[in-house]
């Protein structure tokens, strides 16, 4: 069983709503809602990886100083074990666009339970509800 390091980020707006993104058709877990993010590539830190992913997936830019750790997911999938730190970010430039997702949605933390998300994400919703 290999360990997969993925970083994710909850963009938080002035109304304390969180941005979630719907996974596209043709990918694993298609249609589920997730926090933007992706795998940490060789040579990257978690921070440089999430800054890159936010740019690629949403077209927004931010910096390390604007990333605050929230919690992490540690979840056993069939083919790998996912280790996924979740950051919160309240300050970025640009308006999020669904460049690699089917749709984006701003949701109140308590409403995140109404959206089907990957099983690894359930504990992160509780952490966001506590934080926000
Ligand atoms: N970005 C993100 N990934 C998540 C979340 N929850 C979760 O289980 N994952 C898993 O973490 C991995 C993310 O890797 P990824 O986004 O780079 O890869 P992918 O499966 O979309 O596509 P790829 O492997 O074809 O590049 C996927 O296996 C995804 O299902 C989440 O909230 N956000």
Image (tube, helix red, strand yellow):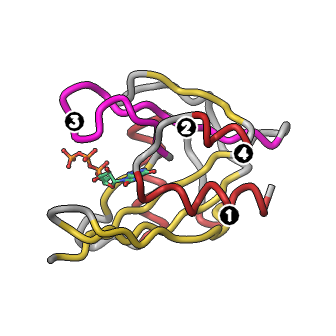
Residue tagged 2: 20
Does the segment drawn in magenta span residue 21? yes
- Separation of disc 3 and disc 1 at Cα? 27 Å
Within 10 Å of disc 1 (Cα), the crowding (few <14, some 14-19, many 20+) is: some
* Lower position in the chain sequence, tag 4 or tag 3: 3
> What residue is disc 1 on?
127
Q: Which residue is mark 3?
A: 27
Q: Which residues are magenta?
A: 16-34
Q: Under tag 3, what secondary structure? A: loop
N-terminal label among 4 and 2: 2
**Is residue 84 shown left or right of residue 4?**
right
Residue 43 shows which numbered tag?
none
Pick the front one: 77 or 65: 77
Q: Residues within 10 Å of mark 3 (few under 14, many from 20)?
A: few
Mark 2 Cβ inside 8 Å of ligand 1 = no
The tag earlier along the polypeptide, 4 or 1, is: 4
How many neighbours does mark 4 have within 10 angstroms: few (below 14), some (14-19), or many (20 or more)? many
Closest to the observer, 24 or 58: 24
- Residue 110, quarter of picture: top right
């Amino acid at each position: 069983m290999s360990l997969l390091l993925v970083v994710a980020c909850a963009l938080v707006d002035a109304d304390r709503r969180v941005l979630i993104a719907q996974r596209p058709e043709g990918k694993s877990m298609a249609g589920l809602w997730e926090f933007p993010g992706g795998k940490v590539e060789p040579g990257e830190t978690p921070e440089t990886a999430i800054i890159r992913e936010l740019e690629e997936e949403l077209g927004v830019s931010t910096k390390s100083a604007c990333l605050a750790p929230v919690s992490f997911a540690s979840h056993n999938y069939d083919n790998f074990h996912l280790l996924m730190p979740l950051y919160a970010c309240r300050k970025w430039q640009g308006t999020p666009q669904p460049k690699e997702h089917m749709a984006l949605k701003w949701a109140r933390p308590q409403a995140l339970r109404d959206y089907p998300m990957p099983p690894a994400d359930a504990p992160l919703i509780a952490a966001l509800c506590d934080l926000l």
